[in-house]
Amino acid sequence: MKFEIDSTAPESIVRRDFIKKLALASSAAWMSGVPRLVRGTGFETPAAKADACILLWMGGGMAAPETFDPKRYAPFEKGMAVDSVLSTFPAIDTVVDDIKICAGLESIARIMDRGTLIRSAVQPDLGSILHSRHQYHWHTGYVPPQTVACPHIGAWMARVLGPRNEVMPPFINIGQRLEGVGEKEELKAFTTAGFFGSEHGPMNLPFPEQAAQSVRPPEGMSGKRFVNRNKLFRKLVDRSPHREHASDYQQESLMRSMESAYRLLNSKEREAFDIEKEPKEIRQRYDTSRFGRGCLLARRLVENGARFVEVTTEYVPFLHWDTHAGGHDTVNRMHREIDRPIAQLVLDLEERGLLDRTLIIVASEFSRDAMIEGKPGSEANDQAAFKGDFIEEEKHYGLHRHFTGGTSVALFGGGVKKGFLYGKTADERPLVAVENPVTITDLHATIMTAMGISPKTEFSIEDRPFYVTEDGKGSPVREIFA
Amino acid sequence: MIMKNVGCMAFLKEITSIVLFFLLSGRLLCAAETDSIDFAHQIVPILQRHCAECHGGEEAEGGFSINNRRLFLEGEAAVPGNAYESLFIELIQDPDPEYRMPSEEKPPVPEAEVALLKRWVDEGLPWEPGFTFGEPAYEQPLKPRLPELPPFVKGRSNPVDRFIDAYLTEGGYPDPRPLDDSTFLRRVSMDLVGLLPTVEETRTFLSDKSPDKRQRAIDSLLARDIDYTEHWLTFWNDLLRNDYDGTGFITGGRSQISIWLYGSLKENKPYDSMISELIAPPNDESSGFIDGIKWRGVVSTGQSLPIQFAQSVSQSFLGINLKCASCHDSFIDQWTLADSYNLAAVYSEEPLELTRCDKPTGVMAKAAWLFPEIGQVDPSAPKTERLEQLAALFTHPQNGRVTRTIVNRLWAQFMGRGIVHPLDAMGTEPWNTDLLDWLAYDFKKNGYDIKQTLRLITNSHAYQSQASSLNEGDNADYVYRGPVSKRLTAEQFVDAVWRVGNTAPAAMDAPIARDKVSDGLVEELSVPITWIWGASLDDGLPPHGERVIAYRTFSPAKSLSSATFVAAADLEYEVIFNGELIFSGRGWKDLKAGVITSRIRPQENCLLIGAENAGSRPNAAGIFCAIRLEYEDGSHEVIQTDEQWLTRSIPPDTADLTEYDLDSGDWDRARIANDTGWEKGTNERAGTILAKAYVGRDKPVRAALVKNNSLMRALGRPNRDQIVTSRPNELTTLEAVDLSTSFPLIDYLRSGAGRLLERHEKDPTSLIDDIYLTLMTRFPSKSEQRLLRGAIGRSPDSECVTDVLWALVMTPEFFILR
């Protein structure tokens, strides 16, 4: 509130008014230990350009020179020198004049005019390159280990912005199994709301085709039985001697959660989780893989009010983008998995008038290179299985090392410029970012700014400030906003 | 807002006598920001000189305090970003001395300083997070103190009550209402052993008329050493960040202390011994705590192993948070970067250089601990000696902080909130210093006997009072009004549900034995291991990638008293008993054992094991299992892998072995794999591992003994990467969705419904009584009886009893411990 000073009023009145206002000031009391929002210095809430965010996660290290940043193409030849390999796919034109991407991404090439391509994202090396650590860093903005459990960026959006639609869980995570896969514990460590508490945590839907079951009565329970069960629950609560605590904070919160759960399970939004409800023809356009079906599910969820949805190609050690061997063939397969669904998602959202307010991000924890592990000069342990100088077998043809010096990130919708290229990597090895490098911290600042969240947003946890971008230092790449 | 070096800190402290709060990461402080206002150097001195005398610390003339930014702004004295509209700027430059601030005879703020203040406001009033002009916070004394016991009133002689009664009387607060018998029994069972009372326990207790029945109930609960241990494991695993699985284990960068911890709790090891063995481990069993989590790759210096050590020992045992001071001098308390590094140096093998905000300082740490008043570590001693010296300082009789910290944690476990809150900020003023000090003193006097303190608290009227919940906000001006209600932990909830249906897992993940395993027992249970495989063995080594299943059926010959088994296979394997996945494992060394007594059917039982051969060329593969059936007449038989088992090679992508159709197709007799080269040592190991399961065969596996799973995670069981000292107290919407749709939960409850129906086939009234006694520790009221009789009808079926059980476990009465 603005304090108006009437310069003609006698001092006593000014003072009295001042003091009265002081007395009104409430000393907000909070649960210590529970994170609370702090309005720190330099805090300024940017105007939101997007209301929803879809992160399309290329888990395992998507090689930029094989996807969004084609370099000199060298087809496989027996005995070729490893150092001659920059890209194993030729470049193709896109609808944007100065942007070329790799063959295999023809559908995406046709929609490049809907978004911005950043080619200069960079990551720290972290010594020994571990996917899970780099993914933790990307998803939370902080390098593990940390002394507090860091929230996922989806949890930040859920916590700061809340749900878009009260019925719909704000943070939904599609496609990543957290049980029965390697490094699952490491994945769980960042697939969480951390210190925000699980209210803001992800709803995990590892199998898009089974998502409907997560919001349906348990298998074998009829709708009628489900409704009756809930009625019985309410009646039992009413008859319990504990009804006298009905207004009690903890009890009320428990009942509210049960109520919201029941509401979701009976809502029309529930249908959004069921991709079978989609016309067959549309389903087919997405149906390249679990990832493709996940994109369709994400679209349906965002249409129905989800705030943040992540769809992953799934990180499983040595699978998918984690191309330690057979790189070229694997990437070929990955192209087929992602190309149509990503393009279709952009087009569908556009057709529904939602693209402008939905930020789509295509990203990965780092890029890959045929020669360099980490960055040039890095001391990172070289984890490539094949270390010869010449390629005799086709399975050694591909980008098998983890490269952190220049990575591509594609952004669509959500107020970013259309058909815009930002940043540049070198044309010859090392393929490092040579223009406008974008750190994870600044990339996060950019994403958060688009969502209307100040990069300096901070919460106090354990009496210490914790910021949405590392130490509140992130600054958005403003050039990419329209 | 930047402080560049220690010197500036000293400068700040000197001129302002301020207490600076916090800062997470040094980088924040250390970042260079040259153009903007430097709050600490430019603004603080001005405010200190002209304003703090009347508006800082205790003083808030006119109700206006500048102690922190919030108070500053609440006064609407300033509009961040707009000096022109800011009242205090207006006031300090008012030409009329009568109106001008500072008032009276004080000189006006010089123009240059006014300009700085304006710039400060225009830049948004940047403030050092946590910086305050207030007085230093309460400082906890180091030494123990024995406060005088207040006289007792109302015949309440328990020392806890004497302090609480005095507190309530003095404050004029009402006496919390006493707890009725059934609520008491429920709460004390959950608090001491983590289990709901059984129907029989409840009936006996409720009908018992003797005045000392509560005291006896407490004693008998504390005497149930296994139940006690398996409940308190949750608390200690959280506090010592111990787990069976998790980050760090994958790369061998972390080790468990499970065996040590289990044994310590079971024997009620004195707390000082526990601390000694954790800080100066006599062997590997307890070394995992100080060894922390070693991450592969580069980590920030604030998370190096020595720094983790400093943070862990101080947080867990002293309630001191050194996380701030691991990067730079802390603003929340007196701890400095040097304090953290010196403590870390006690652990470090290498010389340790102080690193401020990831920048080396050139200063070397010197092993030392935080409270030299009672002694110090000798920095020249070797590491093991330094650790022993440190352990001795933690358990020094004059160290009152360690004892206060633990009794406060135990109090919070029972009462829902600490005497000091938050639990890890022991520097905070307690709401009842005498009570805390007395409990800590008493704890030490009793030889650091944890159970004795638990006994003392649970026997108090204070504990045996009705609990209510705290609202957000009740913590600022907390007043004790009785215990605070608590939500069941994930483990308590899951154990309760497992008990209803007898659906606890057959095998535990914790590498512990519930009782002593004697050599004689191992010998008795040892069986020669026979590895079997499918027909591919006829052609030499089994091909890589081959997936084989082997099974056999059996019926117990006589009335069974127990069934235990041990199994392994190479490489990835799954063990399925009567259509239920019992466990999975990896490799011939990964022998696992379990108890399947409650799963054995009187007629045909089927044990099936599936295994997949790995590698890139043919190599040894095998499946082994031995089931030991013990009968009530004392005899036993062992069924183990041999040529009688049936095998078949199956497609590697066969999805779900629990639904595998055994009746169709042809089977081969198993082949014995003779030349695996694995036999050495495994025979005896099989006996040892089976014996570990065997000694716990009478009790179902508890939730705290298995790895975290999705249901428990949904209910707040944490990843133990960090030390966790309090669990969530609410239920979130996503958790409620999970619990409403969760298939395992419904499955567990359906088993429960089946068991209950068996017992009360024809009698709905006694069925409903039993349900209430089982879940709610009380009889149902008439109206509840009526409601449920209506719901389940005259001939109740499993579906509707399952729904009744679900509805009851979801009620606040079940979920919230009062």
Image (cartoon, coloured by chain):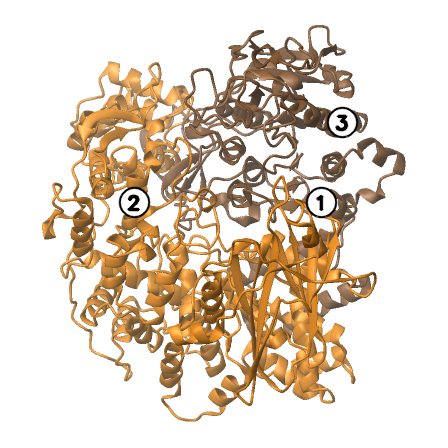
Chain colours: A brown, B orange
Q: Is residue B509 left or right of residue A315?
A: left
Q: Secondary structure at mark 2?
A: helix
Q: Secondary structure at mark 3?
A: helix
Q: Nearer the viewer, residue B661 or B132?
A: B661
Where is residue A336? Give x, y as percent.
76, 27
Query: Residue reaching furthest bottom?
Result: B209
Chain of the residue displaying label 2: B
Where is residue B704? Give x, y as percent.
48, 63
Q: Amino acid at mark 2?
A: Phe
Q: Can you tell which mark lies on residue A184?
A: none
- In the rendered image, which quarter is residue B34 located in? top left
Q: Can you tell which mark lies on residue B309?
A: 2
Q: Is residue B30 left or right of residue B180?
A: left
Instruction: Say if B742 sits above or below B639 in the image.
Output: above
Where is residue A269? Give x, y as percent.
76, 46
User: Is any part of residue A480 visible from this angle?
Assistant: yes
Count of numbered circles on the image: 3
Which callout, 3 or 2, points to the residue nearer the camera?
3
**Mark 3: few/some/many CA within 10 Å (<14, 14-19, 20+):** some
Q: Are marks 1 and 2 in contact (CB under 8 Å)?
A: no
Q: Amino acid at mark 1?
A: Phe
Instruction: Name the residue carrying label 3.
Output: A336
User: Is any part of residue A215 visible from this angle?
Assistant: no
Chain of the residue displaying label 3: A
Q: Amino acid at mark 3?
A: Arg
**Mark 2: few/some/many CA within 10 Å (<14, 14-19, 20+):** many
Residue drawn 84% across and 40% down? A278
Q: CA distance from mark 3 to mark 2?
A: 49 Å
Residue drawn 53% across and 81% down? B198
Q: Secondary structure at mark 1?
A: loop
